[in-house]
Image: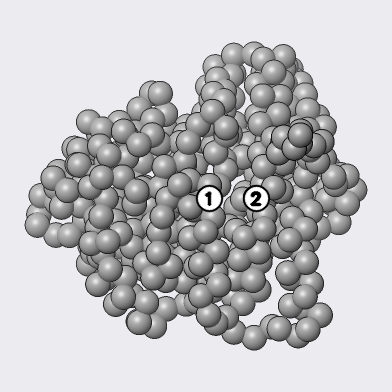
Amino acid sequence: MATPAHTTQRTNPLTELTLPSLRSRTSAKWRRYSSDVLPLWVAEMDVAPAPPVREALERAVTSGDLGYPAGTAYTEALAGFADDRWGWSISPGHMATVADVITGYVDVISMLTEAGSDVIVNPPVYPPFFSYLKAAGRNVIDAPLGEDLRLDFSALEDAFRRATDGGRPAAYLLCSPHNPTGVAHTRTELEQVATLADRYGVRVVADEIHAPLVYAEHEFVPYLSVAGAENGFSLMAASKAWNLAGIPAAIVIGGPAAQRELASYASSPHHGPTHLGTIAQTAAYRHGAAWLDDLMAGLDANRRLLGTLIHEHLAGADYRLPEATYLTWIDCRPLELDEDPSAHFLEHARVALNSGPTFGAGGEGHVRLNIATHPDIITEAVRRMGASTHLG
């Protein structure tokens, strides 16, 4: 009898590295703060490279394959992964490569709108949504999330109405899955987005960089797979799921009704991806699924561990089990630590977290905590945080 596919012992990528080895890293996560600080902030994972990714990069470096990217292997790899993982059939011909996801969504929104146009976002949301759009000459309009941290369709429709009232083209930058709340939008919710966008003539651009990082009881639904989203755009990359921020690459995907615009973008001058980035991400999409499954099992354990630790050490703080991503959102307002609790935890607990207010409306009194690390580090960090609330 054949052995069932998932009966073998898993390896947890999050427990392979020790704190001393992590402190030897030179990336932002481990060098921004002094060595007495436990860094649980920026979206870097404390993992060794997935073996298929490491092997692909080693081959490239050893052979001197360090030039410019070429060919369609990268887009073909994403198409294969999307079909296998999400049952979504998308042609590589509907894709264009770009330097990174931020560059991609700024480029696409700049193409779809004009200087001074309104772009809708859902705060609290990834801070570069505000800064990069404003730098591109766009006006950001808030459609805040609801109290349940999900899309508020009344607020969204009101924002769409205001954005298009003057007759200018408008866009909606959708974060899916949502950062920092870890919400995985449902198909029904995304269909409602598409319906509203069509009603008001708003173009949807979905940042789906966290797409592979959805927990088993939930589902990632590609925005372009829902009815009514045919003229939308998506940005995808393997960088978050396989920890490849240092060698960026990304892909712009256009819906069936956006192919003329995608072709125009693909043929225009824009920053392309790094060659090592495309090599690494191609390997991740083609051969990294088993490693990703092991990672998700480790992250699942960590998100549940965090809930237990908050109950034990930060009683009163509100933490909702994330449906996706390794970024968690904690409401510290009941702890009465002022508008930005991250400042308190850095000073008094020596734990670095992301500041809630930087995520826009609804971020006051919150912190974002990155669980993609060893469970012992999370345990010590929350223990310190809890002790700090009892000072004085």
Q: Is residue 98 above or below residue 186?
A: below
At a point 42% along the width and 32% down the height, the residue shown is 362
Q: Secondary structure at mark 2?
A: helix
Query: Do the CB atoms of the residues marked 1 and 2 lie less than 8 Å apart?
Result: yes
Looking at the image, residue 200 sits to the left or right of residue 187; the answer is: left
At a point 27% along the width and 50% down the height, the residue shown is 229
Mark 1 surroundings: few (<14), some (14-19) or many (≥20) residues within 10 A: few
Looking at the image, residue 210 sits to the left or right of residue 41; the answer is: left
- 3D distance between C-alphas at marks 1 and 2: 10 Å
At a point 81% along the width and 41% down the height, the residue shown is 11
Q: Quadrant of residue 346?
A: top right
Kind of residue at badge 1: Asp
The residue identified by callout 1 is 84
The residue identified by callout 2 is 289
Q: Position of residue 137 (x, y in %)?
A: 30, 65
Mark 2 surroundings: few (<14), some (14-19) or many (≥20) residues within 10 A: some
Reading the chain from its start, which is encountered first: label 1 or label 2?
1
The residue positioned farthest toward the front in the image shown: 1
Q: Quadrant of residue 337?
A: top right
Kind of residue at badge 2: Ala
Residue 329 visible at all: no
Quadrant (top left/top right/bottom left/bottom right) for the N terminus: top right
Q: Secondary structure at mark 1?
A: helix
